[in-house]
Amino acid sequence: MAELRITIGGREFDVACQEGEERYLTAAAAMLDTEAQSLSQQLGRIPEARMLLMAGLMLADKAAGAEDNVRQLRARVEELETQLAAARANPVKVEVPVLPAGVTETLAEIAARAEAMADRVEEAAAS
């Protein structure tokens, strides 16, 4: 077991945790300390047990809000996945108009004329 000294609300505590879990405990203690500091600033010095209880409740409230957000986001993801599956099952058909055969021939003729004119301009410029 690893032994750590953490500070919460200006008070130090010695705690133990499993080897390798130190950084998680330190991060959790920092979150609790942030809430405890906020309480200390608002209420002044309060008994240790009350400070820890209130800081824990504040964190629990934040966690409950985060869980609600996660639930809403999961519901939205499911809704979007359902819409995507429906769209894949029933693809929208788009009709692309086909150019009449005469148009392509006309465009080819215009391109040939443009090339011929470009050749004449180049010859005139070279002379």
Image: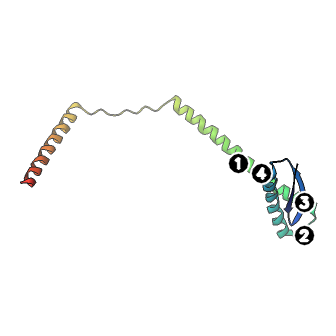
Secondary structure at badge 4 equals helix
Secondary structure at badge 2 equals loop
**Residue occupying image coordinates x 85% and y 47%:** 18
Q: Point out the frontmost of discs 2 and 1.
A: 2
For label 3, the residue is 13
Q: State which tag comes first along the sequence, 3 or 1.
A: 3
Q: Point out the frontmost of discs 2 and 3.
A: 3
For label 4, the residue is 63
Q: Point out the frontmost of discs 3 and 1.
A: 3
As measured in the structure, the alpha-carbon distance from the residue carrying label 1 to the one carrying label 4 is 10 Å
**Residue occupying image coordinates x 85% and y 55%:** 57
Q: State which tag comes first along the sequence, 4 or 3.
A: 3
20 left or right of 71 in image: right
Amino acid beneath label 1? Asn
Amino acid beneath label 3? Phe
CB of mark 1 within 8 Å of CB of mark 4? no
Q: State which tag comes first along the sequence, 2 or 3.
A: 3
Secondary structure at badge 3 equals strand
Q: Residue 85: percent from the left, percent from the top?
A: 56, 32
For label 1, the residue is 69
As measured in the structure, the alpha-carbon distance from the residue carrying label 3 to the one carrying label 1 is 33 Å
For label 2, the residue is 45
**Residue occupying image coordinates x 22% and y 31%:** 101
Amino acid beneath label 2? Arg
